[in-house]
Amino acid sequence: MSAPHHANSRAFQDTVIWITGASSGIGEALARAFAAGGAGLVLSSRQETALQRVRDDCAAAGADGDKLLVLPLDVTDYAAMPGAVQAVLGKFGRIDMLINNAGTSQRSWCLETDMAVYRTLFELNVLGQIALTKAVLPVMVEQGSGHLLVTASVAGKVGVPLRTGYCAAKHAVMGFFDALRTEVAHLGIRVTTITPGFIRTNIGVNALTGTGAPTGKPDIDIDAGMDVSQCAEVIVQGIADGLDEIVVGVGQEMMLLELKRQDPTATFRALEGMAVELRQRGQSPAA
């Protein structure tokens, strides 16, 4: 898209938007986009220093510093959530939008993946999103309005090698938020799923191996993906357009979404072939 990435964010001026995973990647890019449009922003992740940098960058770019709240939060710490919600309400008095964007990926074969890694992937990518959504939902019900979003993935629609846990988690959040949409629509609350393909972030470097340690390696597919600021622009436009599902990406992986709908069997065979190629490349998850 040719417009500057903040062009459509003006529609969200004075909207209070809470973003998890806001210290890097898509979350950081969304924070910059919304801040440029005058939104009130709550920035959450486990990385307080990085959150302060994002906040300062947004302020330096012209955002009103009084509209930026750094709120460190581990989404697996359910006990911290009521206090976090109260902190947001104490600052802004309302929560118009919650973007559940915290999460981590995986690069390991199932046979070589500890059960603890699967548990971690679900705690962070699924149960944490559900818990924070449940903490915020009563506020939106009382307001009579609100918008709940989750960053899912193409991996939430298609099963791909080296990502059994990640695909399971992203399928799960897709199912949860699609089901939640049916329950809260009559309350004036909207639900949107975001379905990115490969976006140029550190998700590959931070992805978990079979032992639970990060790969620490760049991922060639991620590095060849869509620019993260362009991704944020597409998401902001999709929200402004009222989309229930925002698909964002530029690579061949995006074609898998349509292929899976039209010809599941062909999709299965193609991805089996991908697994063979990965093994031939020495089983290196990021090679």
Image (tube, helix red, strand yellow):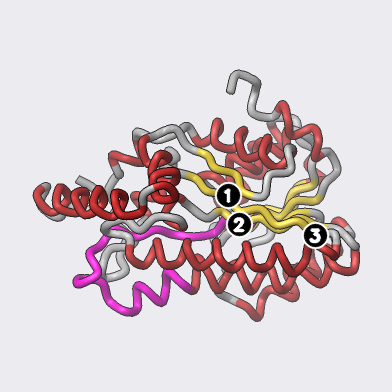
Look at the numbered discs 2 and 1 and tell me whether their residues touch, using CB distance below 8 Å.
yes
Mark 2 neighbour class, 10 Å CA radius: few under 14, some 14 to 19, many 20 or more: many
Look at the numbered discs 1 and 3 and tell me whether their residues touch, using CB distance below 8 Å.
no
Q: Position of residue 76 (x, y in %)?
A: 55, 73
| Label 1: which secondary element | strand
Taking the magenta stretch, the answer to whether it contains residue 114 is yes
Q: Nearer the viewer, mark 3 or mark 2?
A: 3
Look at the numbered discs 3 and 2 and tell me whether their residues touch, using CB distance below 8 Å.
no
Q: Amino acid at mark 2?
A: Val
Q: CA distance from mark 1 to mark 3?
A: 17 Å
Mark 1 neighbour class, 10 Å CA radius: few under 14, some 14 to 19, many 20 or more: many
**Relative vertical location of residue 146 with respect to residue 221 in this rendering, above or below:** below
Q: Position of residue 173 (x, y in %)?
A: 54, 65
**Relative vertical location of residue 177 with respect to residue 217 in this rendering, above or below:** below
Would residue 128 appear left or right of 109 to someone viewing this image?
A: right
Q: Residue at x 81, y 70 (%)?
A: 86
Residue receiving disc 2: 150
Residue receiving disc 1: 194
Is residue 166 among what the camera can see? yes
Is residue 209 or residue 66 the one in the foreground?
Answer: 209
Would residue 69 appear left or right of 162 to someone viewing this image?
A: right
**Figure quadrant of the C terminus:** top left
What stretch of residues is rendered in magenta? Answer: 99-122
Q: Residue at x 52, y 48 (%)?
A: 195
Residue receiving disc 3: 189
Q: Position of residue 34 (x, y in %)?
A: 71, 39
Of the two numbered discs 2 and 1 on the same chain, state the one appearing first in sequence. 2
